[in-house]
Image: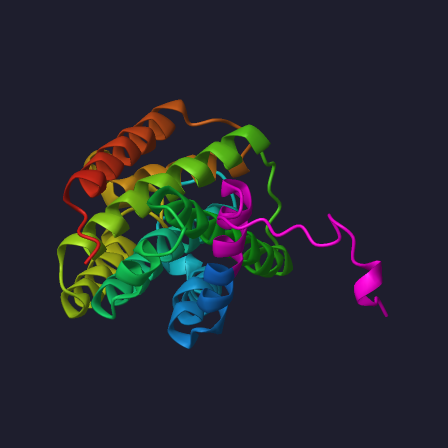
Amino acid sequence: MNTPQDLSVGTFAPAPGAAPLGRQVLAQAAMETRLLLRNGEQLLLAVVIPLLVLVGAVRGAPRLDLDSPHTSVDVLTPGVLALAVMSTAFTSLAIATGFERRYGVLKRLGAAPLTRGALLGGKIGALLCVEVLQFLVLGAAGLLLGWSPDIDVVGLVLAVLLGTAAFAGLGMLLAGTLRAEATLAAANLVYLLLLAGGAVVLPAAAYGELGDVVSWLPSGALGEAMRAACEGSVAVRELVVLAAWAVAGGAAAARWFRWE
């Protein structure tokens, strides 16, 4: 134990001030990830629903006209992985951020040393952490069902990052412009519409003449890019479409997002 005589200059070196930006982002990302994983509704959207869709679609594949030379599980598993990205980056993010606005969480965080950029960086980091968990669970389920992917890593990483950016921009736009209850309803409605008719789980070719239209949606572009990446190729056009949605959604969110 130190005595007063042992305390020389420099024994204690207080360093008041905010932590470095990188440490702030990591701390915020860790907190956001814990909050997401502790929320039952978020887990339902992130893991349970995509898992049920995967098992149900593979079991019911004989009734679907997939129009693909690949097996049904090879077609459906990448689509469900794309659905998982959409669930987390759009629906979960929009709902969580909308209620954070309503309860004044964002306003209070604005009074902390945490900058808006660090706050957004933390949210993006949390999304990527949850997506890794989703891919582990859904990928394992797909392998158990007979999935045999030939993954192009570059195509897969680009599809996930651009898809996350596109849907996160749209989710933040929704959460920053509507009331929390309206955000909840709109995010769930858009999710169901894109799940049913957005060419995210099923290939665009399965929609007939509408396939050319829905492939320009972020859901269709992400689904096609994921299927191509899991078949060993890079879907350049779909990645460009996702990049355009990411830029448009991010710019709109930056312009109209209200923090309070």
Residue 203: x %, y % from top left = 35, 43
Among the 4 quarters of the image, the one containing residue 153: top right
Quarter placement of the C terminus: bottom left
Instruction: Give the residue furthest to the bottom.
Output: 40
**Who is closer to the viewer here, 71 or 233?**
233
Residue 167: x %, y % from top left = 31, 46
Residue 259: x %, y % from top left = 22, 54
Is residue 3 within the magenta segment?
Answer: yes
Residue 211 appears in view: no
Residue 35: x %, y % from top left = 46, 68
Picture residue at 21% right of the left edge, 48% below the top: 173
Q: Is residue 120 left or right of residue 170?
A: right
Picture residue at 43% right of the left edge, 58% below the top: 61
**Who is closer to the viewer here, 86 or 213?**
86
Q: Is residue 4 left or right of residue 76?
A: right
**Which region is colored magenta?**
1-30
Relative to residue 27, is residue 37 depicted above or below?
A: below
Residue 122 appears in view: yes
